[in-house]
């Protein structure tokens, strides 16, 4: 196994209009909207771990599995020599390590005195298998890349941390796919993290409309004549376009789309622009694999194993995890130290994507970190 680290700066500019009115919770909120046009340069370090002969749950293997990550802050060890300030931040489907560097997340959480203050915590943001600069189908294996799943992803994350000499986590915070991985972490490696914060998911099998949407995305690509069983010479653009249309609907927020596009002409222009950006940035094989990675996810049989404190937050306008299913209220009771919060629709929520808009739930996270602070 090999470990390589380099350093760089990420400069992010906050544009006007990113935030709407602040969310008002049942408790007083200290969250404020950052000033427009503020530029923040975060000191990040890039690292790469190479795992030799990584074996997947399907029985397939890769001679070398490359895992890329970025970090902020510095690790700290307690008197016993264990890391006590490392936080693992897990991105969503199709994202990468930089997804949570989005200013609506990082600028609200990473600064001095904020919940994930990088002068206090060591933040680790990986590119999951199949994403970003980590090993993925588009590197060359195409449709012959191992059919990874969330168990493989979590196991590789644990091996990556071992190579980084991180033997304990203060917190795992995951969004969407990362939310589901957080539940897998909790029951697979009980005791490795002091606390878990899964945002925007359910700890049950991907079924019903959720799986139907994912299946339609995969089939939209595979049914494009240009697909050629994954050995296409040029991207199957129509299949990707149809898949991106479905992805857009999955993550959409009706309230915000009505505000952003109140006329027919604006609505059509909005979707044309959104899909053009999405189409240009996607690879068909990568898409098929990362949507199919959820195929056998189902932590529900073993939720009682999750003994660490859990802060689980969903939103009422989440099309992927709709509250009317009533699943969360049942599942949360099976975890001995879990709290589930359903945020109501407001001018600040953004549907499924609320998991990244930290002003909406920042105060809950701050309270959770205070409550789970290890005793000296």
Image (cartoon, grey):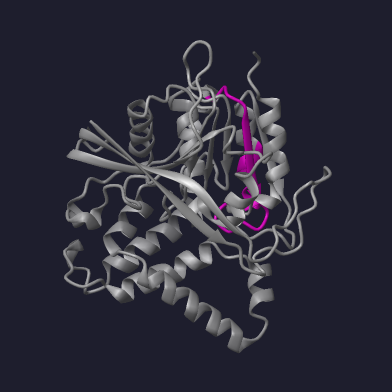
**Quadrant where the image shows the N terminus:** top left
**Quadrant where the image shows the C terminus:** top right
Compared to residue 63, the image places residue 349 above or below, namely below
Taking the spot 41% from the left edge, 58% from the top edge, the residue there is 214
Pick out the residue farthest to the bottom: 265
Compared to residue 162, the image places residue 342 above or below, namely below
In the rendering, at what x and y percent does residue 27 appear? 82, 42
Residues shaded magenta: 306-329
Residue 55 visible here: no
2 within the magenta span: no
Residue 178 visible here: yes
158 sits to left or right of 374: left
54 sits to left or right of 114: left
332 sits to left or right of 294: right
Taking the spot 24% from the left edge, 38% from the top edge, the residue there is 58
319 within the magenta span: yes
């Amino acid at each position: 196994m090999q470990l390589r680290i380099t350093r760089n700066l990420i400069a992010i500019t906050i544009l006007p209009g990113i935030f709407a009115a602040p969310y008002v919770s049942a408790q007083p909120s200290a969250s404020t909207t950052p000033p427009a046009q503020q530029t923040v340069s975060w000191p990040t370090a890039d690292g790469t771990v190479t795992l030799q002969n990584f074996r997947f749950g399907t029985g397939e293997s890769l001679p070398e599995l490359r895992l890329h990550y970025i970090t902020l802050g510095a690790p700290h060890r307690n008197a016993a020599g264990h890391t006590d300030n490392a936080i693992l931040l897990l991105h969503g489907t199709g994202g990468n390590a930089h997804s949570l560097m989005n200013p609506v997340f990082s600028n609200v959480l990473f600064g001095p005195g904020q919940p994930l203050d990088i002068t206090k915590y060591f933040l680790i943001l990986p590119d999951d298998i199949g994403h970003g600069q980590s090993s993925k189908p588009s590197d060359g294996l195409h449709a012959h890349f191992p059919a990874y799943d969330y168990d493989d992803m979590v196991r590789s994350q644990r091996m990556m941390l071992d190579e980084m000499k991180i033997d304990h986590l203060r917190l795992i915070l995951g969004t969407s796919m990362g939310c589901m991985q957080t539940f897998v972490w909790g029951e697979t490696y009980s005791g490795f993290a002091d606390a878990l914060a899964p945002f925007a998911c359910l700890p049950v099998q991907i079924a019903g409309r959720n799986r139907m949407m994912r299946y339609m995305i995969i089939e939209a690509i595979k049914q494009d004549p240009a697909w050629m069983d994954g050995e296409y010479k040029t991207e199957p653009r129509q299949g990707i376009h149809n898949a991106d249309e479905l992805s857009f609907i999955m993550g959409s927020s009706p309230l915000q789309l009505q505000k952003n596009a109140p006329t027919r002409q604006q609505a059509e222009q909005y979707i044309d622009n959104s899909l053009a950006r999405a189409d240009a940035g996607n690879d068909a094989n990568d898409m098929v694999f990362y949507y199919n990675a959820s195929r056998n996810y189902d932590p529900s049989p073993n939720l009682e194993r999750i003994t660490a404190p859990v802060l689980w937050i969903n939103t009422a306008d989440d099309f992927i995890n709709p509250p009317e299913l009533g699943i969360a209220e049942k599942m949360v009771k099976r975890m001995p130290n879990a709290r589930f919060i359903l945020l109501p629709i407001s001018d600040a929520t953004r549907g499924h994507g609320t998991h990244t808009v930290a002003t909406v739930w920042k105060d809950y996270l701050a309270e959770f970190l205070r409550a789970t602070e290890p005793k000296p």
